[in-house]
Amino acid sequence: MDTTVSHFYDPAEYRLRTFHDAVSGFVDGTTTPRDYLETCLAVIESREPVVKAFVTMNLPGARAAADASTLRYRAGKPLSPVDGMPVGIKDLFETRDMPAQMGSPIWKDHQSFRDAAHVHALRQAGAVIVGKTVTTELGMAHPGPTTNPFDAERTPGGSSSGSAAAIGACMLPAAIGSQVVGSIIRPAGFCGNIAIKPTFGALNRGGGHSALSQSHLGVHAGSLQDAWAVIHAIHQGAGGDPGQPGLFGDEILAPPVRPKKLARIATDGWVDVDAPTRDAYEEVIAWLESQGVAVLDADDHRAIAAFESAISGSRKLCHDLCEYELRWPLNVYREMGPGMLSDHMRARMEAAEEMTAEGYRACLARRERVKARLAELAPIVDGMVTLSQPGIAPVGLGSTGNTVFNAPASVSGGPSITLPLMAVDGMPLGFQLMGFAHDDAGAVGIARWMLEAYHRP
Amino acid sequence: MDTTVSHFYDPAEYRLRTFHDAVSGFVDGTTTPRDYLETCLAVIESREPVVKAFVTMNLPGARAAADASTLRYRAGKPLSPVDGMPVGIKDLFETRDMPAQMGSPIWKDHQSFRDAAHVHALRQAGAVIVGKTVTTELGMAHPGPTTNPFDAERTPGGSSSGSAAAIGACMLPAAIGSQVVGSIIRPAGFCGNIAIKPTFGALNRGGGHSALSQSHLGVHAGSLQDAWAVIHAIHQGAGGDPGQPGLFGDEILAPPVRPKKLARIATDGWVDVDAPTRDAYEEVIAWLESQGVAVLDADDHRAIAAFESAISGSRKLCHDLCEYELRWPLNVYREMGPGMLSDHMRARMEAAEEMTAEGYRACLARRERVKARLAELAPIVDGMVTLSQPGIAPVGLGSTGNTVFNAPASVSGGPSITLPLMAVDGMPLGFQLMGFAHDDAGAVGIARWMLEAYHRP
């Protein structure tokens, strides 16, 4: 029994078990990966007209891959824990069988002849690539058509909008996301996902749009088991980013670990958090304390205060870094004519043109200081906690919400996990657990303990 | 008068002055960028059938760009020191007007809609993009058709084969190269170029094939003035690699600086160097000493011995790093069918499959140690010298020669400059000057002094 499933991922309503739970049926022959895929496709058929999570799908390809997986289980030779798992791929990444359109008219119908590194690794491990999920324009802020699966009037968040919504809608057990500022953890929070943004560089992002120095590949899933299975399989087949040591941790999910000490981090966004969200958060904190976990804050240790001071202004820092690094290719795209870039992107271009090499170097130095302050926290606490988003998904599809709670983990490069432990007005809210660089497995162990021990919202 | 020109770059024979020298004529109206381009094209027409430096050319585009530059000089408003400079682009990089075929049947006729970051920056600065130059297969070892301009029976070196040969043949004043192990400095040495492999990350390599953690963008040129003008213009427009501080140094070429102390570095390849090459090298060393430069070796300072010890086995280290990092996309390419990858690349794939994440991490740690040993040399000497290649270009086009003298600077990430100060049997030989990370301008100052002060071979 998968004890790491999101409460918002409702197996009963959609008859979609977590993939981890389904595998025993594939092994004993009572069900098949093809059956599992068909359940996913039925949910997609029913919900996609409103949710709009997908840009493209390859159903014949997915069915053929599921049938091949069925044969492997029948032969007693599955390739990996993700053999037969239906997965969605964020449309910022190349696939040999579907276009990579990057949420941008510039890349409309752009078809690569190859799979991105992680897509290749997933297929090698037996996973079933179902379709490409909606992203914002070039993975930045300008939204696509996706709606929040819990309320179609609300944003699913972004930029991994389609992946987050597909999981929230129980369409798939797992989908790929990527995060530069807040593109995995925030939409996952809005959509009730469990999601992992691993340590910077832990998963190879080859074959994608982004060369940004802060872009992370990660995963959205209905359970922590399925999330870990996906990122482990990607690392197994494709390693980390070139020059990075990649993901550390075993194939099997880390055992649950009750932390001794956690730091609650006051990020910039806290002043604007509404009372119900604050109450929901405090309820989790109180529960942690009731379990014997010491929850420290900046007053308890100067290393916590130093980290908070270092991450202050992280969102602006992310924007400055990205704008400078995006001067190319945005300058090329702008020259392609009107309508190719959104007004939002044009405004960012203008900001980028104001920046100097010296200004950029100062930003890099600030990011290094955040990393150093994070490392200094490792002997003090077992992890850091905060919100995954300022509140429930805002009404309206014109904005994907505020990244202020996500920038610190993106800047620090440490792993970040969102757990759907809270709800306000029936909408999911993510509780963010941040860990230390290269100790993704350690963060996952704490996350597992919380998921298994905490009462459901 | 450009005092930094390579002796092997013969302005008299081809009536091709260095671009730096030509500019005064553009300014006073006695000649034009279009005239300069036509001189280049005449040399290309005469020599290309044997040299085979180019994969593709865009002559109408180049002529139009040269005419536009002519108008700017006429109006007294040139855009930069490279306005009107004809430049060749290594065929590993995207151009909006020519395919990027990567020396591989997989990428045959592959046409991008955009310019690579450095190509965009060069065009913005007014440079004239003439054509795409031959590269080895995917920038690795399997050679293209290019011949050495000084002896068509010999290799031009690789992987920047066409760029090195185009400069050696006086076809162009400058051409773009890239180096992972020895792909700029070695072919430049074989072809009598002046070339700069800047500090790792100093120039943005966006829009190219390689995401390798050791790939450097650099330049081949007929003079140090023109080489620096190109890399400065690239940095001005496109910055460095994302996450790297980029190139340091002013637009104007660093003044000549006589170093006080240089370390002569005994790299792995020295045991196989033939007597004439060794004699030519010792002649330069003796000259340095005659100028009051202290040339130290491992016996003189333990930091030099420590650096030599750290770089021992650098070539193997480079290969191990690259093989692991190239598992993707080579695995995708291999699956595309027979004939898509050379036997050489298939063999590297097999080696890559033997590697583990732990083995790769050990390689990364070794590279970090080399960088640390290099930094420790900075207070001891002003630079390091060695050969740019084991000897003159070997006979035969089946191999692009040995990278053993180049791997140390690639691993260390510091700048490396080759100076065509030597010759054996009428063939050029490069003398390699290595500098310290982010002090490219310092290395260039020493290189300039050597070029200006040393008697010609």
Image (spheres, coloured by chain):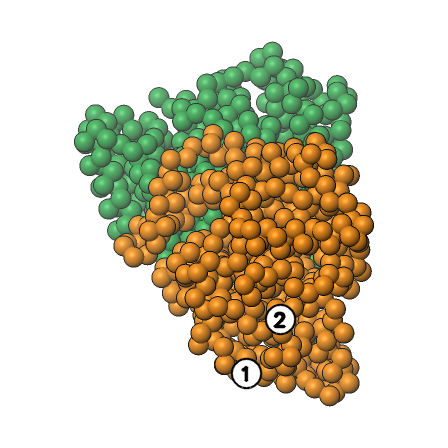
Chain colours: A orange, B green
Q: Nearer the viewer, residue B369 or B390?
A: B369
Tell which circle, 1 or 2, labels the residue nearer the N-terminal end. Answer: 2
Structural distance between the alpha carbons of marks 1 and 2: 16 Å
**Rendered location of residue B144, percent (x, y):** 50, 55
Helix, strand or loop at label 2? It is: loop
Residue at 59 percent of width and 61 percent of height: A423
Q: Indicate the quadrant containing the C terminus of chain A: top left, top right, bottom left or bottom right.
A: bottom right
Q: Can residue B135 be seen in this view?
A: no
A439, above or below B29, in the image: below
Q: Can residue A74 be seen in this view?
A: yes
Badge nearest the viewer, 1 or 2: 2
Residue located beneath label 2 in the image? A9
Q: Indicate the quadrant containing the N terminus of chain A: top left, top right, bottom left or bottom right.
A: bottom right
Q: Nearer the viewer, residue B189 or A207?
A: A207
Residue located beneath label 1 in the image? A42
User: How many other residues sit within 10 Å of disc 2, few (<14), some (14-19) or many (≥20)?
Assistant: many
Residue B348 falls in image quadrant: bottom right
Residue at 62 percent of width and 55 percent of height: A280
Residue B169 falls in image quadrant: top left
